[in-house]
Amino acid sequence: MLSKKNIKSLNAKNIVSKAIKKLEECSVAEDSYWFWEYALQRSKTFEKQIENCLNLKNIHFSKKPSLIDIGSAPFVLPISLKLSNQFSKITSVDINPYRYKNIEKTGLQIFKIDVDKPNKDLIKEEFDIIYFSHIFEHLRINIIETMNFLKSILKNNGLIYVETPNSYSLKGLYNKIFRGISTGCAGDLYEEWIKIDRLGHMGHVREYSLSELDTFFKKMGFEVVRKGYTGRYQSKSFKTISISIFQTLFPRSQNNIYFILKKLH
């Protein structure tokens, strides 16, 4: 099992840097402004995701579990996990991965699947861990069908990590009360829906509360191994420092919620 010290010693920052360098060397998505803006501006996010995946490995107790990352673009996380050499196999899923030029040069195993209406015949294997971070808020058709698909590609006692914006975050409550907006992190309603045509992936559709997702996942037949709140404002100014302190004292106001789910049968 990896201790917290060993996870830190893997140096997620260095791994992310190498992953981005590999994407550059392969000339991936040279014509996509979104791809590179996201890849270069979210290094801290990718570092946290690497730590999340290594913690999932610890919980699973396999020496080298297999992992599938759903919604992989811009593919920094799966490349980083391959570089970490802590998993037996890393697989990527994206709604339309080949909209990014030269993505096949990365050597990743990539499936083109829309998890809103998944083709269950494309993936014939099962995985130990499914990483499903910040995808749930994009789902627009049938979340029961999507979760059944994930269950079908997960081994018994396998784990799913879900992270999604907290509908009752501090910003979410502010928007609801003072601005009449129903979300905390989604933009203009039209702009969120038009992303599926402009960018090739869906924008944010809905945010959820911890309690309603807890009930939903249990009715889907999962064991909730862990759940909670995560993601505070980064301390850049007096205002954000104050908000960050408030969110530390009152975790329910944090930006995101997370679940670790186990497939029982």
Image: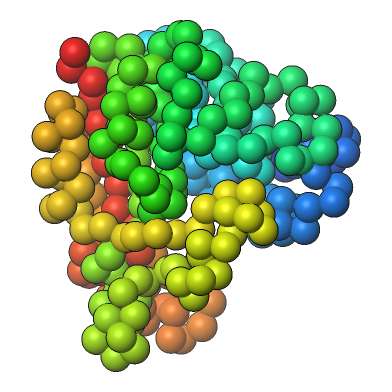
Does 188 appear above or below 113? below
Residue farthest to the bottom, as pictured: 178
Along the viewing direction, whichever of 101 and 210 lies nearer the viewer: 101
Along the viewing direction, whichever of 224 and 86 lies nearer the viewer: 224
Q: State the residue at coordinates (29%, 27%).
A: 148
Along the viewing direction, whichever of 164 and 188 lies nearer the viewer: 188
Place of residue 129 in the rendered image (x, y in percent of width and height, measured from the top left): 39, 22
Place of residue 128 in the rendered image (x, y in percent of width and height, measured from the top left): 38, 16
The quadrant in which the N terminus is found is top left
Q: State the residue at coordinates (78%, 52%).
A: 32
Answer with left or right where residue 58 lies relative to residue 218.
right
Does 69 appear above or below 76? above
Place of residue 42 in the rendered image (x, y in percent of width and height, measured from the top left): 61, 55
Q: State the residue at coordinates (19%, 53%).
A: 210
Q: How many marks?
A: 0
Along the viewing direction, whichever of 1 and 132 lies nearer the viewer: 132
Answer with left or right where residue 208 lies relative to residue 1.
left
Q: State the residue at coordinates (58%, 53%).
A: 196
- Whether residue 237 is visible to the viewer of this picture, yes or no, is yes
Does 190 appear above or below 106? below
Does 110 appear above or below 21? above
Answer with left or right where residue 39 lies relative to residue 126.
right
Place of residue 236 in the rendered image (x, y in percent of width and height, measured from the top left): 53, 77
- Whether residue 18 is visible to the viewer of this picture, yes or no, is no
Coloured how?
Answer: rainbow
Write down the quadrant of residue 78 in the picture.
top right
Write down the quadrant of residue 72 in the picture.
top right
The quadrant in which the C terminus is found is top left
